[in-house]
Image (spheres, rainbow, N blue to C red):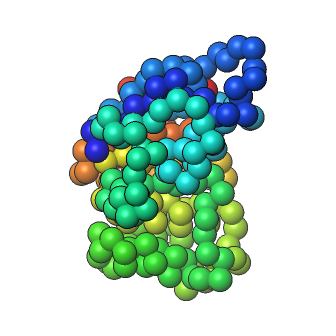
């Protein structure tokens, strides 16, 4: 996948608004592989909806979203499985961690599907993120910030053309945010991928090519 192209895309719940001031909604905008984008958003502007639309599990929007000029509403379930396995990684704001599984089991669940990371590499990521002692702790017993770091590691355990991170450091201190940034830049460089980050305030520090207002 080389591009994500939004054409006059707008959440249906916004359709009756008299005016929309946004760099994304109701615009013609393309996210290109290999570039980094920051989407700054106020609460209630549809940030999480945008994530849901691009990941393909909600379609309550007007307009068109294309992957390489193919309308994503045309994809079959089988095609979406392949896209989420090989082309598009997503770190959701609500994390979607399995609380009854350990930190490592949450990662292995993803990595067993993709076969992308060796166990030693996964352990190295836990160490780098400062949660090496949480490998065998059930995720439900971890703090939100610790769960956020596990979700981040999981997002790296697959090949991707684009990685979408929805408020990835909302519960991290500056030090952990910097570590996450370094690890992300390393993985993105290796894969030649594009990065789309959303924020309602504090954001991960990256060399963004473009900053957009939602």
* Rendering coords of residue 79 (x, y %): 35, 58
Residue depicted at 66% across the width and 57% down the height? 94
Q: Position of residue 114 (x, y in %)?
A: 33, 71
Q: Is residue 17 left or right of residue 175?
A: right
Rendered residue at 37%/75% (across/down) = 113
180 lies above or below 204: below
Name the image quarter holding residue 30. top left
Q: Is residue 40 left or right of residue 56?
A: right
- Which quadrant is home to the C terminus? top right
- From what the image shows, is residue 101 above or below residue 116? below
**Residue reaching furthest bottom?**
136
Residue 82 in view: yes
Q: Is residue 138 above or below residue 192?
A: below
In front: 136, or 43?
Answer: 43
Q: Could you tell me residue 112's position as x and y percent?
A: 37, 79
Q: Is residue 169 visible?
A: no
Quarter of the image for the N terminus: give it: top left
The answer to whether residue 128 is above or below residue 44 is below
Q: Residue at x 43, y 72 (%)?
A: 110
Which residue appears at 65% of the width and 48% of the height? 170
């Amino acid at each position: 996948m080389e591009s994500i192209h939004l054409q006059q895309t707008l959440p249906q719940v916004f359709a009756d608004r008299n005016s929309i001031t946004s760099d994304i909604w109701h615009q013609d905008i393309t996210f290109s592989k290999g570039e980094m984008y920051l989407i700054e958003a106020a609460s209630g502007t549809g940030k999480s909806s945008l994530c849901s639309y691009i990941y393909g599990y909600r379609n309550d929007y007007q307009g068109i979203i294309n992957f390489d000029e193919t309308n994503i509403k045309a994809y079959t379930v089988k095609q979406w499985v392949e896209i989420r396995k090989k082309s598009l990684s997503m770190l959701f704001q609500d994390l979607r961690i399995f609380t009854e599984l350990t930190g490592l089991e949450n990662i292995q669940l993803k990595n067993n599907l993709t076969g992308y990371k060796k166990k030693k590499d996964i352990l190295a990521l836990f160490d780098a993120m400062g949660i090496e002692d949480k490998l065998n702790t059930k995720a439900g017993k971890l703090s939100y910030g610790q769960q956020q770091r596990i979700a981040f590691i999981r997002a790296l355990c697959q090949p991707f053309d684009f990685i979408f991170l929805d408020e990835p450091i909302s519960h991290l201190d500056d030090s952990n945010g910097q570590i996450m940034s370094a690890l992300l830049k390393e993985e993105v460089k290796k894969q030649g991928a594009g990065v789309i980050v959303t924020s309602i305030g504090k954001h991960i520090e990256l060399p963004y090519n473009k900053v957009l207002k939602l």
